[in-house]
Amino acid sequence: MKKNLYNIFSIMFFFILTLTVSCGDNTQEKAEELLRQAQKECDNGNYDKTLALIDTLRNKYPKAIETRKKALVLHADASEKQAKKRLDDIMVELDKAEAKYSALNKTVTEHKKSNKAKSDELTELTIARMHRDSIRTSFEAECEKIKYIRKQRQKGLN
């Protein structure tokens, strides 16, 4: 009877051990698949999707250490590319805002000299300047983000 129980426990232990090992390998495979999907999205320029997939990988597979290390590199790459893309968009918007502000400023300056400046013109000029300045702030923030990512990457390499 004791020998039977021992055999049953041995078989159960072996079964649980096999199940645990096979689940571990499956976990690694799933983490690698998420990383492949994230890389594909990054290659296609879908940086938001890339970062979301990496966050999912981090949350669902905390023990897939090597895959997570690779994901960190991809996260930095995607974040930098995303910031560069935003920077390009901001530069276009900044050029438009700067041109609008310059034109308004020229008109208002001429009207001031001839005492024809109206309050709505002055208000429009102030709003245009504030809009331009807020875009400049966004531009500077994206530049700083890129610098920070590059600095962190350099720290990681050293």
Image (cartoon, helix red, strand yellow):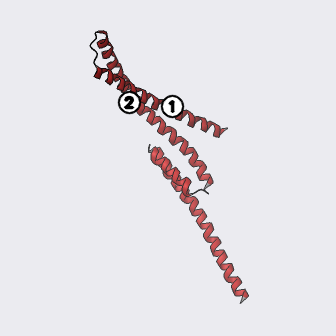
Q: Nearer the viewer, residue 142 or 115?
A: 115
Category of crowding for the residue at label 1, using alpha-carbon neighbours closer than 10 angstroms: few (below 14), some (14–19), many (at least 20): some
Taking the spot 29% from the left edge, 13% from the top edge, the residue there is 111
For mark 1, what is the residue? 143
Say if 112 sits above or below 6 in the image. Answer: above
- Which residue lies most toward the right here? 2
Taking the spot 55% from the left edge, 42% from the top edge, the residue there is 76
Q: Is residue 30 left or right of residue 21?
A: left
For mark 2, what is the residue? 93
- Secondary structure at badge 2 equals helix
Category of crowding for the residue at label 2, using alpha-carbon neighbours closer than 10 angstroms: few (below 14), some (14–19), many (at least 20): some
- Secondary structure at badge 1 equals helix
Q: Quadrant of residue 157?
A: top right
- On the image, the x and y values in percent for residue 59 come to 55, 55
Taking the spot 64% from the left edge, 78% from the top edge, the residue there is 12
Q: CA distance from mark 1 to mark 2?
A: 15 Å
**What kind of residue is marked 2?**
Glu
Question: For the N terminus, which image quadrant?
Answer: bottom right
Question: For the C terminus, which image quadrant?
Answer: top right
- On the image, the x and y values in percent for residue 156 come to 64, 40
**What kind of residue is marked 1?**
Cys
Q: Is residue 53 left or right of residue 107?
A: right
- On the image, the x and y values in percent for residue 110 come to 30, 12
Taking the spot 41% from the left edge, 33% from the top edge, the residue there is 89
Q: Quadrant of residue 73?
A: top right
Say if 135 sits above or below 50 in the image. Answer: above
Q: Quadrant of residue 28?
A: bottom right
- Which residue lies most toward the front here? 119
